[in-house]
Amino acid sequence: MSLEPVYKRVLLKASGEALMGGQGFGIDVTVADRIASDIAEARHMGVEVGVVVGGGNIFRGVAVASKGGDRVTGDHMGMLGTIINALALATSLRKLNIDTVVLSAISMPEICESFSQRATLYHLSMGRVVIFAGGTGNPFFTTDSAAALRAAEMGAEAIFKGTQVDGIYTADPKKYPDATRLDRLTHQEVLDRGLAVMDVAAVALARENSIPIIVFSIHEKGGFAEILTGGGLKTIVSD
Ligand code: UDP
């Protein structure tokens, strides 16, 4: 495998569920360490990396709303979950001596820096991995939308959406063994076909900013680096 990356600056989206491993909840440090080692590999290749982490392993706002509670409070709880995950991933990266900063959309200066585009570009230029925490900072959004937003703000060449499977399939491959992986799609096709890869707002934002979305399996060790060099199994969503 060539170690020459095709991309120089990317945004990796990892769902909170990716961090929980085989547990039903929370963070499996072994899994966080493994994902961190993939990010470290990308850094060693010279790729600038921003990361948006989800929070679904800790809390989702709809869980409150579905039981009659206030959705906004639920979403605040979900966003706080993403900050816990971001701190866990930053810890795993620092264990590997990867310089890392957490920028949060919700200010909590005792814990981490606040997000701004200026801070993002500065830290990237210093060779740091930038982990974007707190989603967009707004309720009724998701961390997928945060990924598209931060990718546009940091000038990422692509969004790498790490999922449970190695791309977008014609149907859920876990339920339908005959489902086949699609190699290439446009953003519009993803929207028209209602493919559940990222939410509609995220795909629309990526389309408007002409940012490709590369869907791959986050569970393959070394998979991120392989895809950064143009190989590996994936689906590319681009215009
Ligand atoms: N969330 C939010 N605004 C955002 C991002 C996230 O309110 O901009 C909340 C929302 O409640 C969501 C939760 O945080 O359910 C966790 O994020 P998400 O569901 O995107 O995590 P993932 O599925 O990627 O683990």
Image (cartoon, rainbow, N blue to C red):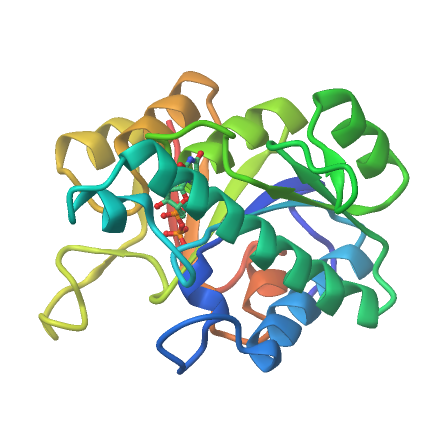
Residue 160 visible from this viewpoint? yes
On the rendered structure, is 170 left or right of 58? left
Judge whether 110 appears above or below 233 on screen: above
Residue 135 image position (x, y, % from top left): 50, 37
Quadrant containing ligand 1:
top left
- Residue at the outermost top position: 208
Residue 168 image position (x, y, % from top left): 28, 54
- Residue at the outermost front position: 69
On the rendered structure, is 94 left or right of 80? right
Residue 134 found in image quarter? top right
Choose between 132 and 105: the one closer to the eye.
Answer: 105
On the rendered structure, is 98 left or right of 88? right
Q: Residue at x 51, y 27 (%)?
A: 149
Residue 1 visible from this viewpoint? no
Residue 63 image position (x, y, % from top left): 25, 51
Judge whether 202 appears above or below 14 on screen: above
Residue 198 image position (x, y, % from top left): 32, 42
Q: Residue at x 75, y 47 (%)?
A: 111
